[in-house]
Image: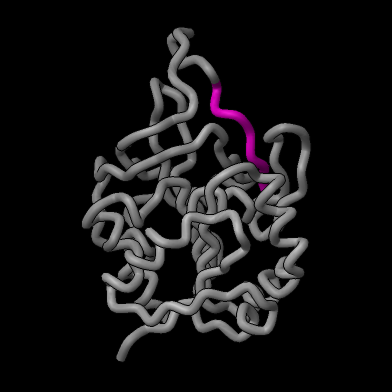
Amino acid sequence: MMSKVTVIDYGSSNLLNVVRALEHCGAEVLLADQPKAIIEADRLILPGVGAFADGMASLKNKELIEPLKSFCQKGNPFLGICLGMQMMLDASDEFGHHQGLGLISGKVVPIPSQGINGEPHKIPHIGWNELQRPRPRENWDGTLFAGLNTGDPMYFVHSFMAVPEDDSRRLADCEYNGRTICAALQYQNMTGCQFHPEKSGKLGLSIIYNFLQLK
């Protein structure tokens, strides 16, 4: 039976690649920009590219913030991608201070402009980077990352990074010139990926496939 998944269409997200990846994995994809469709979704994805403030403003203007929160409270599977993951947190310091969805306690801050050796590095952080398991997490069993291994590469494009208040919410990290960057978050029924699984080849598609199998 084909899994149904609703993707939030709020005017500032990279929908086409996400939709294609979902359909490749066998999903029936519904695009939603109305509160009722979000609340009644079986599974929900919040994609996103661009600035934090613009993304939150678009959700607010379409009156989607409270329906999105109500959906997450139901306990159904939720996935945030890139900006979508960042907006799951309480707030961001990107171009000022802006309130987020508050689904996971924490904030979004700039990636340090220098590596741990003090030398400047390129911002934004663009390209393939290897996933690491945060301590003390021993494995990814029972998560969307089941079947992945430490060192598996994913594709990143971002200048800001999530910093959860509770490190147990960190599902995966990566390192950028010695700087630890949160690559994924998980709390209850909610998962967020800073990288783009839809652009990360077969390994990224395995995350999407796992999401579609959740009950």
- Residue 149 in percent (x, y) is at 24, 50
The scheme the figure's colours follow is one colour
Residue 147 higher or lower than 83, as above or below? below
- Residue 55 in percent (x, y) is at 66, 52
- Residue 95 in percent (x, y) is at 72, 32
Please check the rendered image and state whether residue 189 is part of the magenta-colored stretch, yes or no: no
Residue 163 higher or lower than 197, as above or below? above
| Relative to 176, 95 lies left or right | right
Looking at the picture, tell me which residue is in the foreground, 132 or 54.
54
Residue at (48, 79) in percent of width and height: 30
Q: Is residue 9 visible?
A: yes
Q: Quadrant of residue 28?
A: bottom left
Q: Quadrant of residue 41?
A: bottom right
| Count of numbered marks | 0
Q: Which corner quadrant holds the C terminus? A: bottom left
- Residue 139 in percent (x, y) is at 32, 54
| Relative to 9, 98 lies left or right | right
Residue at (41, 22) in percent of width and height: 178
| Relative to 66, 201 lies left or right | left
Please check the rendered image and state whether residue 111 is part of the magenta-colored stretch, yes or no: yes
Residue 92 higher or lower than 66, as above or below? above
Q: Which residues are magenta?
A: 105-112
Q: Residue furthest left?
A: 202
Q: Which corner quadrant holds the N terminus? A: bottom left
Q: Is residue 142 visible?
A: no
Looking at the picture, tell me which residue is in the foreground, 134 or 70.
70
Question: For the stretch drawn in magenta, what is the main secondary structure?
Answer: strand
Residue at (57, 66) in percent of width and height: 9
Residue at (44, 44) in percent of width and height: 183
